[in-house]
Amino acid sequence: MTQSQREALLDLVILALFADSHISLKEDAALQAALEKVGWEAVKPREIFFLNSMSRARQVSESASATSAYLTERAQVLKGGWSSAETVCFIASILASDGVTPEETAFLGEVKAALA
């Protein structure tokens, strides 16, 4: 997985956390553990990217069309990295840490469609 694909994956995970308007401590812990497995190879620390990604996700989550466009853009970067199934499973495992809401299930469906 390239660094740009790692960044796109992180962007999608953070956007997923906004799907139900609730970010739990369990989700955050699962996210941190999962990201350790993926790695980080950028000059900019992951924490700085994470904060910027949170800001982007917050902005696009205010509009369904903006969310869809952002999701599609980030999914295009991910193609050729992991399979779409691996990506969806990765995101789903983080969301499942505190139970998956209907909004999160719908978001996972959008991720699947964007990766198809």
Image (cartoon, rainbow, N blue to C red):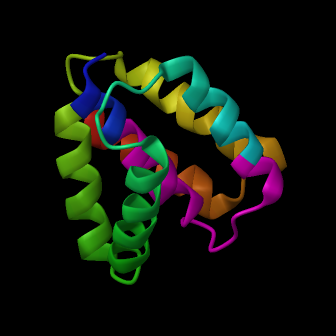
> Is any atom of residue 108 visible in this view?
yes
Q: Please give the name of the residue rendered at 76% of the width and 43% of the height, measured from the top-left corner.
A: 29
Q: Vertical placement of 99 versus 3: above or below?
A: below
Magenta-colored stretch includes residue 15: yes
Relative placement, left or right, of 42 versus 31 is left
Residue 62 coordinates in the image, percent (x, y):
39, 83
Q: Please give the name of the residue rendered at 25% of the width and 74% of the height, measured from the top-left corner.
A: 65
- Count of marks, rendered view: 0
Residue 48 coordinates in the image, percent (x, y):
42, 55
Q: State whether the magenta stretch is mostly helix, strand or loop.
A: helix
Q: Nearer the viewer, residue 48 or 75?
A: 48
Q: Vertical placement of 110 versus 41: above or below?
A: below
> Is any atom of residue 112 visible in this view?
no
The stretch of residues the image draws in magenta is 8-28
**Quadrant in which the N terminus appears:** top left
Q: Vertical placement of 102 versus 90: above or below?
A: below
Magenta-colored stretch includes residue 11: yes
